[in-house]
Amino acid sequence: MAELYGRTFDAATLAARTGSLSQVGGVRLVTLADGVERGVRMLEFRTGSGLCFSVLLDRAMDIADLSHNGRAIGWHSATGFRHPGLHDAEAEGGLGWLRSFSGFLNTCGLDHILGPETVPADDYNYPRRAIAGHGLHGRIGSVPARLTGYGERWEGNRCILWAESVMVQAAVFGEVLHLHRRIEADLGGNDVRLSDRVVNAGFVRTPHMFFYHINIGYPVIDEGTRLLAPIQEVVWASHDATGPAQASYRRCPAPLPGGAAEQVWQHEMACDAQGLVPVAVVNDRIGLGLQVETRKDQLPCTYQWQNFQSGQYVMAVEPSTHHVKGNLFARSRGEMIWLGAQESRSYDTRFSVLDGADAIAAAEARITGIAPQPDTDHPVPTGRFASLHNATDQTGVPA
């Protein structure tokens, strides 16, 4: 049953009270019409519970806005949601991605993640392309979707809001990778369900890397906001070689002066008996938070990005297929994922709004019951990178 306004409804009892389901919730296709966003197609989801989010069809079906009862959860940067026709991933030494970086969810991949790198491209059997250059976080984030369906559907007494699409990242003498994405939410619900399947639609062995840049902003991110995570150990930190951390990994400061640097951590997470890894970011003062739930066997690594510089002020939870040290590091350890012809990998993620002190307390109890996180603001990284993906050597033969 759909829970709305303090009571439950089936399709008939709700239809009796409305001229159209869109009166209380639904999915609507719109097109942005001004500035750098002009021409971008967007799906607007409203669940009727106060949860609203928008999906950028022309930017890999990523999520732009996410809010609850008018309170923002997702982060916006100064770039706006630029049309992909204005995006040049190869620009600025591979850092062009930053010219379009904004929103709650940014998908990174499909054959490269993290910093710009040049890697071998022998598998594509093209002499003029012995190497492949990759920019920051790969190319998929600027690929428009082919929308295959969207709308609202009653399944028994449950009403599901949904959308599906396919994104194609391809080159002649290069990768041919398809991202099949489905996003769902229940009428009356406070969860967003994201299901992804990455398919090698080509016929040569192709590398695959993948992670989600899940960006949370003000008012959830504010002075005193807490990270709750089943952290077994802190593996790596970007500031480790340059000096002490500017900010705690577990509690947010107020916005820092303009000279503040970003911080990135990698944490080794524990999972529950079902293989699930819940991570929450909570603001106790306003009684609002967000929980991100992934599968350890699908996304074994988790980064935490902190950019508390004034005017940017954001923290991200980043579940990933690979360690934070990147593409060449994964290849050197035999940890690259190689997809053969028509092979695929699937990823299932749930975003849950934590509305009120009781919801926050329940999430905290669940997370701490899996593993207690380090009880210090600045834990010393261990430098131990766990072996991933049944490691193979460079030829794809089990090591």
Image (cartoon, grey):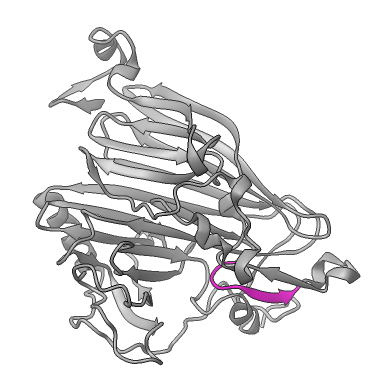
Q: Is residue 396 visible?
A: no
Instruction: In the rendered view, tell whether residue 272 sits above or below residue 351.
Output: below
* Residue 97 shown left or right of residue 278 in the figure: right
Task: State the image coordinates of residue 318 (x, y, percent, origin top left).
Answer: 41, 64
Q: Which residues are magenta?
A: 112-120
The quarter in which the C terminus is drawn is bottom right
Q: Is residue 144 visible?
A: yes
Instruction: In the rendered view, tell whether residue 293 sits above or below residue 122.
Output: above
Of the pair 314 and 298, the residue shown nearer to us: 314
The quarter in which the N terminus is drawn is top left
Task: State the image coordinates of residue 385 (x, y, percent, origin top left).
Answer: 47, 83
**Residue at horizontal 23 percent and vertical 9 percent from the top:** 17
Q: Magenta segment: does it hold 119?
A: yes
Quadrant housing residue 327: bottom right
Q: Magenta segment: does it hold 293?
A: no
Task: State the image coordinates of residue 125 (x, y, percent, origin top left).
Answer: 87, 67
Outermost residue on the right side: it is 127
* Residue 34 shown left or right of residue 368 in the figure: right
Total labels: the figure holds 0
Of the pair 216 and 31, the residue shown nearer to us: 31
Quadrant housing residue 248: bottom left
**Residue at horizontal 39 percent and vertical 55 percent from the top:** 77
Task: State the image coordinates of residue 32 (x, y, percent, origin top left).
Answer: 48, 33
Of the pair 323 and 246, the residue shown nearer to us: 246
